[in-house]
Image (cartoon, rainbow, N blue to C red):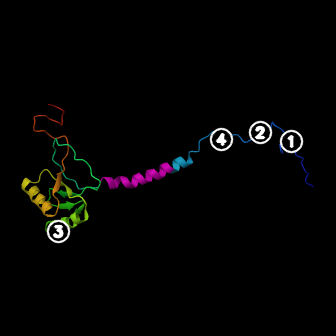
Amino acid sequence: MGAGVVGRGKAGGRRGRGRARSAAMSEINVTPFVDVMLVLLIIFMVAAPMLTVGVPIELPKTAASALPTVKEEPLTLTLTLDGRVLIQNTETPEGDLVAKLRAVAAEREDNKIFLRADGGISYDRVMQVMGALNAGGFSNIGLVTDGGGPALDGSDLVNGNR
């Protein structure tokens, strides 16, 4: 019942050199890695639908190159074939268009706006809206098109023929 006292030798409390120490673990613990991957998967599943939000329009095709990007989020105005006008993704009545554009222009550093118009809309209608954009304070207007359209030099960029 009594506790025995073990004497210490020269080895500092060790009885012999042959005693096994804890072996180093050679497996990789993948649990934290799986946890991080599941969190990232959930984030991308939530964020992916938000990246594809837009108004479906049929943009005309041209051979023009893309415009350089800017530091501010680009402002877009969309004209749909059914006559709707949208600033970003918010539908705007035509009577309020110039007033809303002036309010937006006052808040922005850049006076650049991108105009997305369905290819079936008349040239006259697009020019009317461009006049409203100018009256609203946006003098730098970029026209958005789909690439790969015909170039007027006789080449067919869609099929790669010259």
> Which mark is first along the chain, 3 or 2?
2
Q: Residues within 10 Å of mark 3 (few under 14, many from 20)?
A: some
Q: Amino acid type of disc 4? A: Met
Looking at the image, which is closer to me, 33 or 152? 152
| Residue in the image at 9% along x and 59% along y | 128
Q: Amino acid type of disc 2? A: Ala
**x and y percent of residue 63 in the render?**
16, 41
**x and y percent of residue 93 in the render?**
16, 67
Q: Check disc 3 and report its element: helix, strand or loop.
A: helix
- Label number found at residue 99: 3
Q: Check disc 4 and report its element: helix, strand or loop.
A: loop
Boundaries of the magenta span? 36-52
In the rendered image, the vertical position of residue 4 relative to residue 152, given as above or below = below
Q: Check disc 2 and report its element: helix, strand or loop.
A: loop
> Mark 4 or 3, which is nearer the eye?
3
| Residue in the image at 65% along x and 41% along y | 25
Q: Quickly name the residue at label 4.
A: 25
- Label number found at residue 10: 1
Q: Quickly name the residue at label 2.
A: 20
> Mark 3 or 1, which is nearer the eye?
1
Number of residue marks: 4
> Mark 4 or 1, which is nearer the eye?
1
Q: Is residue 100 left or right of residue 27?
A: left
Q: Amino acid type of disc 1? A: Lys
